[in-house]
Structure formats: C-alpha cells, structure tokens
Image (tube, grey):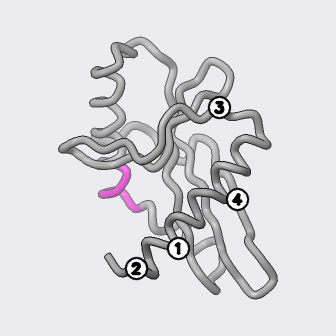
Amino acid sequence: MSKERVELGKRGEALAVGELKKLGYKIVETNYRCRLGEIDLIAREGKSLVFVEIKTRRYKPLGYAKEAVHPRKQRQISKAALTYMKQKRLDGARARFDVVAISLTSEGAKIEVIKNAFDLAY
C-alpha cells in the first residue's frame, strides 16, 4: 500500500472516530486483525457492539465510498467479527455492522454514518 493511501486511511479513521464519538459511540478497539480479515473500528453504542468499516475517498461523492463495501468485503468483515466475538466470549451480544463513508473535497470532509449498513454475511 502506498504511503499516500496509508495517510488517507489514517485521516479517514481519525475523522470517523471523531464523528462516532459525537454520536455517542464508545470506541473499543481500532484496526482489529485476525487471519480472516480486519475490522477498522469496534465500538459500543448503547447495548450494541458495532463493527465499523471506514471508507475514505478524495474528490468523489459519498456514493463511491459506500459502494466500496461490496458483498465480498461484507463476508470478510463478518468472519472477522465472529472471530472477535468468540475470542472475547461475546457470543450472545447484540451486534451490527455500520459503515462510515468519508469524501474529502476542496470544501472539506463530508461524513456519513450508515447504521446497520449490512447484515452478517458468511
């Protein structure tokens, strides 16, 4: 991955964390990795455990970022989420998948939080 993409990802993650905190989410973990995949953010909102995928794009409408969470990516995130829940003994926890779409333009960052963006897919 290029240095520019890594920096874009870090900037997007920082913006997403700030937005989610404003909305009342409590960040549990960032950049969770296991052999089955990666989850950008794991948070709690109320009684729900929330697995968050962050998509950041430059100079493109928010739709481009949202569309990047395709079915294959959803399956990968789902498998990683199930692994996380098993490791942490959270098998009975209420969980959902959110997406944070970020578009960076000359006018600034546009951020959209999509709750329940997709269902468990594996």
Q: Position of residue 63 (x, y in %)?
A: 61, 72
Q: Disc 1 to disc 2, how far (Cα)? A: 9 Å
State if disc 1 and disc 4 touch (CB < 8 Å). Answer: no
N-terminal of the pair, mark 4 or mark 3, is 3
Magenta-colored segment: predominant secondary structure: helix
Instruction: Indicate left or right for 4 with 47 as reference.
Output: left
First in sequence, mark 2 or 4: give its number: 2
Q: Tag 3: residue type?
A: Lys
Residue 72 is inside the magenta segment: yes
Q: Which residues are magenta?
A: 70-74
Asked if residue 79 is positioned above or below residue 15 in the image, the reply reads above
Q: Secondary structure at mark 4?
A: strand
Percent across and percent down for residue 97 are 50, 40
Is residue 5 left or right of 58 when viewed as pictured? left
Q: Amino acid at mark 4?
A: Glu
Q: Find numbered disc 2 in the image and state the secondary structure of the residue it sits on.
A: helix
Q: Nearer the viewer, residue 2 or 46?
A: 2
Q: Assign the N terminus to one quadrant of the image.
A: bottom left
Q: Are marks 4 and 3 in contact (CB under 8 Å)?
A: no
Picture disc at residue 8? 1
Q: Residues within 10 Å of mark 3 (few under 14, many from 20)?
A: some
| Residue 66 lies in the magenta stretch | no
Q: CA distance from mark 4 to mark 3?
A: 18 Å
Locate residue 87, reporting x and y percent. 28, 22
Q: Amino acid at mark 2?
A: Lys
In the rendered image, which residue does mark 3 sit on? 26
- In the rendered image, which residue does mark 4 sit on? 112
Judged by depth in the image, the label closer to the viewer, 1 or 2, is: 2
